[in-house]
C-alpha cells in the first residue's frame, strides 16, 4: 500500500505519516521546503508526475497556510484550491481507484455560536474560507461526476507540541515555560474569554484514517464537541509551574477575535468508530512537558 501526503511538514502531516508507517504503508511526503519529495502542490506538472509514478492507494491534501489573513489570499488559493484541482484531475487521469482526503476547516462554516455539523451552511468570510469552500465543491464535483473516492474532514481547533508559536496555544505554552525559567516577559493576549476546542493532532489524523477506510460517509466534522476558554488554558498552564497567571498576562482589549465560540457536533465521525483519546488537560500536559 502506498500513500502521498501533501503538506507533510505540518503537524497533521507529521502525525499521519507516523500512523501510516506504523501500519506498514509506504509514505511519500511532499513539501515545498523539505520532505521525501520537494515541490508545490499548485504545480500541475509536478503533481501529475508524482501521482502517475507512485500510483498511490491514498492521497492526503494537508498543504495550507492556516491563517484567515487577507495577506495569504493568493498563497492559500494556489495551495488549497488549485492544489485540490491538480490532485483530483491527476487522480482521474492516472489512478482513479485512489482514495483522496481533502482537509476542510471549521472556519468555512457559518458560525452562530451553536455546535457546527455537516448540515451547517458554508460562509465565505475570509480568503481562507473561500479557498476551503472551493476545494470542497471541487471534491464533490469529482466524486459525483467521475465516481472518485473523495473524502473531506472538517478540522476544528487542534494542537500538538509541533505547533509554531504563531498559534495562540503554543504561544502561551512557550511563554509560560520561559517565565518558569526566570523570564520577566509579559504574555500579551487578546480576548481570553473566547471558547474553542482543544484537540490533539494525533487524534485528528486517527479520525482521518477512520473516515477514508469506509465508504458510507464522505464528509465529516472532526472535533471533540467540547469547548474551553483560552483563559482556562492560560490558568492551567501557569498552574503547572506554580505561577499566578494574572501577574504575567497583559490583555490587549483592542484585539477583535474571529468568533466568541467555535465548537463542533462530532456525532457523525463518532458513529463510524472514532473516539477522542487526548482531552484538554492531557494536551496541555503534553505541550508543557515537551522540551
Image (tube, helix red, strand yellow):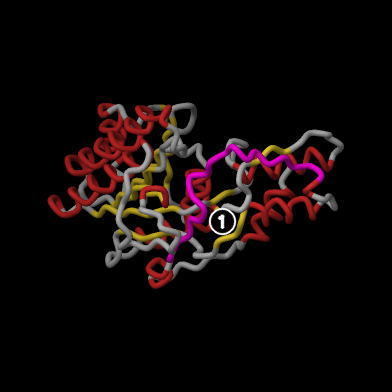
- For image coordinates 46% across by 67% down, the residue present is 274
Nearest the eye: 197 or 138:
197
Which residue in the protein does label 1 denote?
195
SS at badge 1: strand
**Horizontal side, residue 279 vs residue 39: left or right:** right
**Horizontal side, residue 240 vs residue 228: left or right:** right
- For image coordinates 87% across by 37% down, the residue present is 182
Instruction: Residue 65: name its quadrant.
Output: top left
Q: Which image quarter is the C terminus in?
A: top right
**Horizontal side, residue 175 vs residue 52: left or right:** right
Q: Residues within 10 Å of mark 1 (few under 14, many from 20)?
A: many
Q: Position of residue 181 (x, y in %)?
A: 85, 39
Instruction: Residue 71: name its quadrant.
Output: top left
Q: Going by the picture, which residue comes out furthest to the bottom?
A: 271
Q: Determine whether 93 is above or below 273 in the image.
A: above
Q: Going by the picture, which residue comes out furthest to the left?
A: 145
Residue segment shown in magenta: 247-265
Predominant secondary structure in magenta? loop
Is residue 111 within the magenta segment?
Answer: no
- For image coordinates 25% across by 35% down, the residue present is 86
Q: Position of residue 68 (x, y in %)?
A: 44, 38
Q: Is residue 243 visible?
A: yes
Amino acid at each position: 500500500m502506498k500513500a502521498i501526503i501533501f503538506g507533510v511538514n505540518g503537524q497533521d502531516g507529521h502525525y499521519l505519516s507516523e500512523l501510516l508507517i506504523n501500519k506498514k504503508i509506504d509514505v511519500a511526503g511532499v513539501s515545498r521546503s523539505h520532505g521525501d519529495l520537494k515541490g508545490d502542490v499548485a504545480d500541475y506538472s509536478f503533481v501529475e508526475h508524482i501521482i502517475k509514478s507512485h500510483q498511490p492507494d491514498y492521497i492526503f491534501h494537508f498543504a495550507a497556510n492556516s491563517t484567515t489573513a487577507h495577506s495569504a489570499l493568493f498563497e492559500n488559493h494556489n495551495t488549497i484550491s488549485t492544489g485540490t484541482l491538480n490532485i483530483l484531475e491527476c487522480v482521474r487521469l492516472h489512478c482513479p481507484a485512489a482514495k483522496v482526503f481533502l482537509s476542510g476547516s471549521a472556519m468555512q462554516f457559518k458560525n452562530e455560536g451553536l455546535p457546527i455539523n455537516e448540515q451547517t451552511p458554508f460562509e465565505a468570510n475570509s480568503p481562507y474560507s473561500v479557498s476551503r469552500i472551493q476545494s470542497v465543491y471541487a471534491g464533490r464535483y469529482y466524486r459525483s461526476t467521475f465516481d472518485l473516492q473523495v473524502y473531506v474532514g472538517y478540522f476544528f481547533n487542534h494542537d500538538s507540541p509541533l505547533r509554531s508559536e504563531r498559534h495562540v496555544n503554543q504561544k502561551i505554552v512557550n511563554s509560560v515555560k520561559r517565565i518558569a525559567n526566570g523570564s520577566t516577559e509579559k504574555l500579551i493576549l487578546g480576548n481570553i474569554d473566547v471558547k474553542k476546542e482543544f484537540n490533539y493532532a494525533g487524534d485528528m489524523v486517527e479520525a482521518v484514517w477512520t473516515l477514508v477506510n469506509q465508504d458510507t460517509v464522505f464528509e465529516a466534522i472532526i472535533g471533540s464537541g467540547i469547548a474551553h476558554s483560552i483563559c482556562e488554558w492560560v490558568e492551567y498552564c501557569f498552574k503547572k509551574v506554580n505561577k499566578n497567571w494574572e501577574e504575567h498576562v497583559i490583555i490587549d482589549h483592542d484585539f477583535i477575535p474571529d468568533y466568541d465560540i467555535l465548537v463542533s457536533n462530532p456525532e457523525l465521525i463518532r458513529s463510524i468508530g472514532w473516539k477522542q483519546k487526548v482531552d484538554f488537560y492531557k494536551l496541555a500536559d503534553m505541550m508543557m512537558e515537551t522540551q
